Image (cartoon, rainbow, N blue to C red):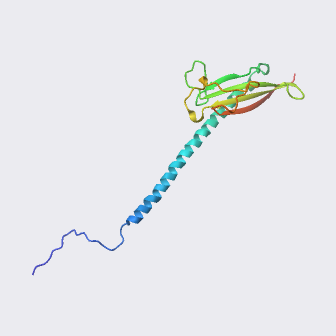
Amino acid sequence: MIMAVQPKYCFRFSKSKDAFTLVEIVLALGILAFVCATTISLIGLGMSTFRKAVDRSVVTQIAQLMANEARQSDFAGVTTNGIISYFDDQGQKLSVANTTPAIYVAQALVFSNTNASVANPYVKTIVIQVANKPGGVVSDLRTEPLEADPSLKLWSSSNPAPVTTSFVVIAQCRP
């Protein structure tokens, strides 16, 4: 009598469902690819929004700095128009000798209250304009003059760099 010996490791195909089918794997990969593509597109949008928020925050910081300088100066001395200041990407004021590229440029224009129906020599309006290269593009704004309205010296919105305008009204107590 001859007995057949079965090998210790035998590969048999079972009819039980222990693994995924090819259709299930392809469907899962399709869903995963869709989720990844959507996530990647949202990351780009989030980074763009973040850059805009940083730009807006630094512009506001620069306008606040210039407004505080105007408030702290002597009222009679607040007469100079068109003083242009340059700032780096962190909103720090740059000196003329500094070689760091100016990402932001700001100007302060002073208007006396003489155009009103009742002239008031104790009130002045300061217009602060800040222009920037959006997204922190490293290009020196010192070399790119901004177009201005010749009568008011205000920078126009037709400039390639966006311009943000703030108004500050300062008053002197009557003697």
| Residue pictured at 77% horizontal, 20% vertical | 79
Q: Quadrant of residue 157?
A: top right
Task: From the viewer's side, name the closer residue of 11 and 33.
Answer: 33
Image height of 95 relative to 165, above or below: above
**Quick check: 50 left or right of 14?**
right
| Residue pictured at 33% horizontal, 74% vertical | 15
Image height of 30 relative to 53, above or below: below
Residue 164, x across and y down, in percent: 68, 33
Task: From the viewer's side, name the closer residue of 41 and 147.
Answer: 147
| Residue pictured at 63% horizontal, 33% vertical | 58
Image height of 115 relative to 43, above or below: above
Q: Quadrant of the N terminus?
A: bottom left
> How many dots with numbers?
0
Q: Residue furthest right?
A: 118
**Quick check: 44 left or right of 70?**
left
Residue 78, x across and y down, in percent: 76, 21
Q: Quadrant of the C terminus?
A: top right
Residue 152, x across and y down, in percent: 76, 26
Residue 143, x across and y down, in percent: 59, 23
Task: From the viewer's side, name the closer residue of 158 and 28.
Answer: 158
Q: Quadrant of residue 150?
A: top right
Q: Quadrant of residue 159?
A: top right
Q: Residue furthest left?
A: 1
